[in-house]
Every structure is written in structure tokens, then in C-alpha cells.
Image (spheres, rainbow, N blue to C red):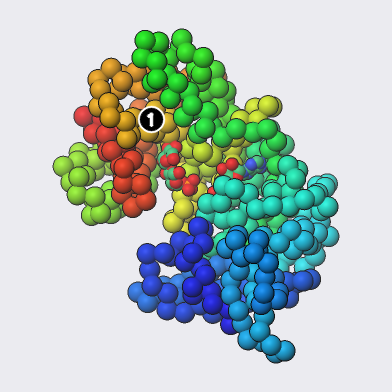
Amino acid sequence: MLPFVDWLPRQRWYAGRHRRIQAVRPEAVTALPGMDHMLLNVTYVDGGSDRYQVFVRWGDPQPPAAERATGARIGEAEMEGGTRVGFDALYDESAAREILQLIADDKSVGTLRFASEPGATLPVDAPARVGDAEQSNTSVVFDSAAVMKLFRRVPPGLNPDLELNRVLARAGSRHVATLLGAIESTDPDGQPLTLGMVSEYARNAVEGWAMAATSARDLLNDLDKHADEVGGDLAGESFRLGEAVATVHRTLAGELGVTTGRISVDAMCDRLAEAVKTVPELAPYTDRAEAALRAAGDVEIDLQRVHGDLHLGQVLRTPAGWLLIDFEGEPGQPVEERRRPDSPLRDVAAMLRSYEYAAYQVLVGREDGDDEKLNERAREWIDRNQNAFCEGYAAVTGYDPRERGMALRAYELDKALYEVAYEAKFRPAWMRIPLKSVDRLLR
Ligand SMILES: Nc1ncnc2c1ncn2[C@@H]1O[C@H](COP(=O)(O)OP(=O)(O)O)[C@@H](O)[C@H]1O
Ligand SMILES: O=P(O)(O)O[C@H]1O[C@H](CO)[C@@H](O[C@H]2O[C@H](CO)[C@@H](O)[C@H](O)[C@H]2O)[C@H](O)[C@H]1O
């Protein structure tokens, strides 16, 4: 047995770092050409378990230094015939290509189903390397032609990232990276498992976050100029981004339907209570926040499938226009929760929040971060880009999201509260950004 207990906590995508592992057991091992596919059952001392996916390439106990450097070496295992070393196969170019070939060939091996989308061509001979921006999953880029994302934590249920990308690609959406194929399976209870997906690689793309952060920084470095006077003005792009998000919403509504219902304010209030428990600075806002959230639940609104975790880091500007990526929904929520129809205002609110982040993160850590003029300028940049985004959205849908004030505010507040708890855990220096927003939204 490989020493997964030591290796998993060292991986960027491993989500159980704050818990103590009780045991790691292979739940299913499937022999593939040149490697093993493993689904691992990780149990924790405090109860509960998670399922993780690893492709294991077996090798010699003396790996070259380059292989060790990637962190791909899982460790040694005693096997029939002697000691073998297991590596994370995604870092091995030939193994990554073999996985892509299985998809191109529409192969089924054991319970694993590798399938290409109708008419898709996969770049099976292209050079492959693991992408730099590894987050909660691992993506292998095939020479600027395709990106294969392997989900690491695999809960039961159809992953909305695959589900919605498939729907949008088949509907011909110009605002997603076209889906080329997928890897799926079924667990012993008959639940679907989404293991991976391949999409067209967006060439010459820039992340919305990088564009926004540069634009905001340029403005805040030259206080004599206003947001519409600096070279890096983003308003035109923000308008087009609003159009793109609205177009994706319209396609999802057309393909998957719209119902009417109420905002799930109970879930929002539960999140509020959780956030207050971990961040005492939120305590003075509890009653006002709960009242604002509950009030938004009094009216019926349109509900449909949405992105669910939209922010400027989830949009790519390509020469042809904006793409939305990573439709996985809010990490940490159960899959069924993430697939539940919601208001498009959730995505709009999340983008509005992201504009606040892009401007205020420039001030974090600056000695003059509390300077009044600097803060006024930051607000000006935020307002300009939020307005442009909403106008772009309205140009497609016919309604400006700001007309739905009470619901929009509830979603903004819900996201800001989520962010306070998120930052307290992962980026304490940034917690002041959402905290300030909670204060503003409840004033
Ligand atoms: N189709 C694509 N083309 C080019 N780059 C992409 C594409 N999809 C994702 N990326 C890049 O990879 C990063 C991580 O992708 P994402 O889907 O958000 O993975 P994760 O679920 O691991 O966060 C993105 O921030 C983006 O920079
Ligand atoms: O990892 P995910 O992309 O699923 O999202 C999580 O991490 C995000 C941090 O990168 C967090 O987003 C927050 O910070 C962003 C800037 O880094 C900002 O653009 C977002 O508006 C802000 O919410 C996201 O909330 C979290 O789910």
C-alpha cells in the first residue's frame, strides 16, 4: 500500500488538511494501460470520509531528480516482485496522453467510462504538462489545444461543471470553452461519479481578475486621474462581461428551464450563524443581517441553473470575447445543493463582490490604505465597473439587476458573509475587504 496518508496532505488540492486522517483505503482500483486508476476512501478521526482520485504510474525506486521535484512521487510499496515506487501519473507526459487517448477511443474499462463529445477531435499527440494554476483539481494542458481537468475529490453525483459545460457546448454557447470529452463512473450505490473533463484550451486568454487588478492598481497609483481617464479603464470590458454572463444565463434557462420560487433564506441564515460563530467581528451585524436576508425571502422570483461561484478569477478574456469557466459551484457544498436552481442574481451579486475585491485588495498592506482620497478613488472604480457590468447584463436580458434591489442585496450580503469566513480561514489580511462590505450593505 502506498503511503497516501503522508502524501495527500502535501497536495494543494487536498481539502482535509485541518482534519486528522484515520485511514486511506483503495475503494476501487482499475488497471489501465501503463497505470492504475485509484479511488481512495479517506476516513477521518473526527468521523466522516472523502473519496479522492489518483492515477498511479509505477516506477523504479531510484527516480531521476526531476521527477522527485514535482512532488509527484507518492512513495514506495512492497509488491510481488519487490519494491515499486508510485507516482502521480498526471505529471508523466506519456501517461497523460494515454488518458486522453482512452477518451478519444471512447473506451470503457471496469466501471470507468472515457467518452469524447460527438464530433470532437482530441490532440492525443500534443505535448502535455500540468497547468500552473492548480487549485482544487489538477489540469493537464495539451499544447494550447485542450485542457484536461481531473477532479480530485469525487463526491457522489453529477458534477455541475461537466453537466453545465456539456449543456452549454451542445447549445453552441460562445461563452464557454467547448467541451471535448469526459471521464465518468458509477459508485457501488449506483450514483454517478464525475472524474474528469476535457475542454478546448482558450489561447491568448487573460483572467478577468488579472485585468481588473491591473486596472484598479493603475488608477490607485495616479490619484490625480479619474477612473474614465486612465489607460487601463475596464468599463468597456465590464459591459461585455455583463453581456456574456447574461447570455450564459439565457442559454441555461432555455436549455434547462425556469421555475418560480423563493430564495433559500434559511440556508443563508444558517451560513450567517456559522460565520458569526467563527468570526466574532460579525456579532454586531447578526440581527440586521438576518432581517435583510429574511425580507428577501418574502417574494417569488425566477429560479434556474446558474454558475454558482462566479468571480473575476472564473472568467477568461480571449481575443474572441469572454468565457466563463469552472461551473463546479461553491466548493464545500454538497453536489445536490450546488445543482439546485437558484436566481441568476446570485452570479450577478458574486461578480459585483469581485469588483470590490479587485479594488480594495490594492489597499491591503499599503501604509496609506485608509487614506480617504484613495478609498474614494477605489469606490469610484468599483461603481464605474459594477454599473458597466449591470448595463451589459441589461442589454441582453432587458432588465437591470439593480432593479431587483432587495434580492440582489441579500445575495451580496450572503456572499460577503461567506467571504468573511473564507478569508478568516485562508487569507486573514484580506478579511477587512468583505467585513467593510457587510458594514456598508447593512448601513
Ligand atoms: N479552457 C481553458 N483554457 C485556458 N485556460 C484555462 C481553461 N480552463 C481553465 N483554465 C485555467 O486554469 C485555471 C484553473 O481552472 P479551473 O477550472 O478554475 O480549475 P479548479 O477547479 O482547479 O479551480 C483557471 O483559472 C484558468 O487560468
Ligand atoms: O477556489 P474558488 O475559485 O472556487 O473560490 C474560492 O476562492 C476565491 C479566492 O480566490 C474566493 O473569491 C474571493 O476572492 C477573489 C479574489 O481572490 C474575489 O475575486 C472574489 O470576489 C472573492 O469572493 C471565493 O469566494 C471562494 O469560493
Residue drawn at the location 45% of the way across and 75% of the way down: 43
Above or below: residue 233 compared with residue 428: above
Residue bearing the label numbered 1: 362
Residue drawn at the location 54% of the way across and 39% of the way down: 314
Extreme residue in the left direction: 284
Above or below: residue 16 compared with residue 233: below
Please provide percent x and percent y for residue 235: 50, 18
Left or right: 296, with 123 as reference point: left
Mark 1, residues whose alpha carbon is within 10 Å: few (<14), some, or many (≥20)? some
Residue type for callout 1: Val
Left or right: 198, with 206 as reference point: right
Quadrant in which the C terminus appears? top left
Residue drawn at the location 64% of the way across and 64% of the way down: 65
Question: Toward which corner of the image does residue 21 lie, by quadrant?
Answer: bottom left
Please provide percent x and percent y for residue 114: 75, 62
Quadrant in which the N terminus appears? bottom right
How many dots with numbers? 1
Question: Toward which corner of the image does residue 44 lie, by quadrant?
Answer: bottom left
**Ligand 1 in which quarter:** top right
Please provide percent x and percent y for residue 338: 49, 52
Is residue 105 visible to us here?
yes
Left or right: 144, with 270 as reference point: right
Is residue 111 visible to us here?
no
Extreme residue in the bottom direction: 80
Please provide percent x and percent y for residue 189: 58, 74
Viewer-side residue, 201 vs 213: 213
Mark 1 residue element: helix
Residue drawn at the location 33% of the way across and 52% of the way down: 425
Left or right: 208, with 222 as reference point: right
Viewer-side residue, 282 vs 397: 282
Tell whether circle 1 marks a residue whose Cβ is less than 8 angstroms from ligand 2: no
